[in-house]
Amino acid sequence: MHAATLLLTVVLAGAAPQDASLESERARAAGLLEAGQPARAAELVRSLLLRQDSAALRNLLGDALEAAGDLLGAAEEFQKAAHADPSEEHLFDWGNCLLQL
């Protein structure tokens, strides 16, 4: 039992820095978007999606594409986010973007 606990601790310790790095990069992408650099934000989010595909990242990519004027691309990303996690935020963002098309 002790060996299994040790293995789990090692695995979790190895995963923690990657999760923290991913979260800091997501925050950096959100900052780029807020700073009026949606193309750079979208590029960063696309690279993050290669590491971990999530509804939150898809929604952030949709925000970046919408801000860059790519409404069709944004709608596609909002749709993916809404299908992965049908939260109010994701459904609202998807519907709002569709209304702009």
Image (cartoon, grey):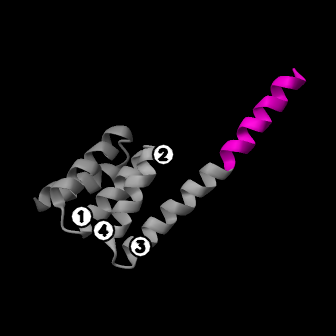
Secondary structure under badge 2? helix
Contact, mark 4 vs mark 1 (Cβ under 8 Å):
no
Query: What is the distance, in whole Å, between disc 4 and disc 1 at their CAs?
Result: 10 Å
Type of the residue with mark 4: Ala
Q: Earlier in the sequence, mark 1 or mark 2?
A: 2
Q: Earlier in the sequence, mark 3 or mark 2?
A: 3
Q: Residue furthest right?
A: 2
Query: What is the distance, in whole Å, between disc 3 and disc 1 at their CAs?
Result: 14 Å
Q: Residue furthest left?
A: 101
Residue 67, located in which quarter of the rendered image? Answer: bottom left
| Dominant SS in magenta | helix
Secondary structure under badge 4? helix
Relative image position of residue 2 (x, y in whole percent)? 89, 25
Give me the residue at 66% from left, 43% from top: 15
Query: What is the distance, in whole Å, between disc 3 and disc 2 at their CAs?
Result: 19 Å
Q: Which residues are magenta?
A: 1-16
Q: Earlier in the sequence, mark 4 or mark 3?
A: 3
Contact, mark 3 vs mark 2 (Cβ under 8 Å):
no
Type of the residue with mark 1: Glu
Q: Mark 1 or mark 2: which is in front?
A: 2
The correct choice, above or below, for 59 with respect to 39 in the image is: above
The residue at which mark 2 appears reads as 51
